[in-house]
Image (cartoon, rainbow, N blue to C red):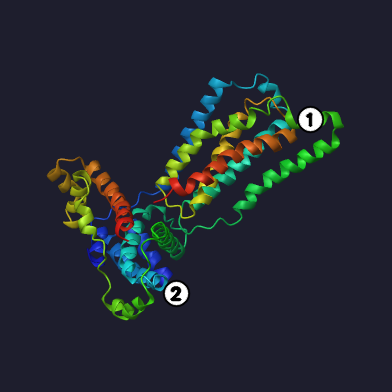
Amino acid sequence: MEGTEARLKTLMSEAQRGDAAAYERLLAALATHLRAFFRRRLSRDPDSVEDLVQETLIAVHNQRHTFAPDQPFTPWVHAIAKYKLIDAFRRRAARPEEPLPEDDALDVLAERATEAATAKRDVAKLLATLPAHFRLPIEQVKLQGLSVQEASVRTGMSVSAVKIGIHRGLKLLARNLQVVSDAHG
Amino acid sequence: MHTDELVRMLATRLEPVPVGAVRQRWSYALALSMSIAFILMWWSLGLRPTLSTTVALPMFWIKLGLPSFLLAGGLLATTRLARPGARLGHTPWLIAAPVILIWALAAFTLIDAPADARGTLLYGDSWRVCPFLIAELSLPTFIATLWALRGLAPTQLRRTGAAAGLLAGAVGALVYSLHCPELAAPFIGLWYVLGIALPTALGACLGPRLLRW
């Protein structure tokens, strides 16, 4: 465990300085850890595991400025994951008419463990519903990999508007993920 | 979207995190809201006319000291609670200590005083307005602190709301103490503490609703 903490913390420090490759490795490693974390705690509702993994990854991204380099990394991620889990439970408790899946859902757990990875709620579809001044910067910079300057030229938005669009758009996306799961569970 | 794709999307064209962004957010919020509270006090209540002579009295500094220490404790608690996974450590004791000290001082003062003077020591001339004026002067900081927190990631919302309210209440009391004519420890221990407790309770109530992310 100590090795994991040191490795992830190093990746996080590099990511905060703007190292995209380190960040991708960090998020990929986190996805694996988070999947195990949520699967243990959502044994009655394995369908929601990948939703929560994705929701937490976006939360980690949106809140990455709140990680202080002098702070241990594992408790930081753990607190975010736990917060997202409790939030999901709270939303579920607000809709008692929808019964929790029966325990036989446990049987399929083994298969799910290997396949994983496609969520019920499609982030791509949610992205398509965002207003253009959020959606275009995210599509062009985060999906097509254009630079902020290139996206600025293509969209006619200023460079700072593109940056703000990405930032606010991802926040709105995180919020819409909660709303959608409120509606469909 | 597959989780691998999401990971790739989040990492693409990653922008570095600005150094000191969180600290800057707090500095803006506090500097601006404290100035507004001070101006509000100056315009609507006015500085205490005898302030220049009162500064020589030790009790004036004790009256300033209570909110100052609570401000430090509240700020420490709020900024820590705003980061996921950060521990409060000894902060609750740092907050309790000045309150316990002023209560001890108030108790000594009351025991020491003749029976017919105790009412004056406790109620002064302004007990009816004191806690409400403190709560009112805490509002700018209350709003600014909640704004700062909405850009951060508190995970214990009720506690964080209470800490934010405490911070705001301490600022309100500190600013109000420059107007307030009272100097008796029992008065400070009761009405100042109550004035600070009002926004603290409000923060605890509103935290879970306003600080969700």
A49 with respect to B28 (left or right): left
Q: Classify residue B88 by image quadrant.
A: bottom right
Q: Is residue B107 above or below residue A46?
A: above
- As helix, strand or loop, the secondary structure at mark 2 comes to loop
Task: Kindly report the distance in space between the C-alpha atoms of the residues bearing marks 2 and 1.
Answer: 62 Å
| Residue that extends furthest to the top in the rendered view of this protein | B49
Question: Looking at the picture, how far across and down is residue A180, in whole percent?
Answer: 29, 56
Question: What chain is tagged by disc 1?
Answer: B
Q: Which residue is mark 2?
A: A1
Q: Amino acid at mark 2?
A: Met
Pointer 1: what residue?
Answer: B119
Mark 1 surroundings within 10 Å by alpha-carbon count, few (fewer than 14), some (14 through 19), many (20 or more): few
Q: Is residue A100 above or below residue B208?
A: below
Graded by Cα atoms within 10 Å as few (under 14), some (14 to 19) or many (20 or more), the crowding at tag 2 reads few
Q: Quadrant of residue A125?
A: bottom left
Does residue A145 appear to the left or right of B85 in the view shown? left
| Image quadrant assignment for residue B120 | top right
Type of amino acid at the residue the image marks with label 1: Gly
Query: Is B85 rendered above or below residue B189?
Result: below
Residue depicted at 61% across the width and 22% down the height = B47
Residue at horizontal 46 percent and vertical 52 percent from the top: B154
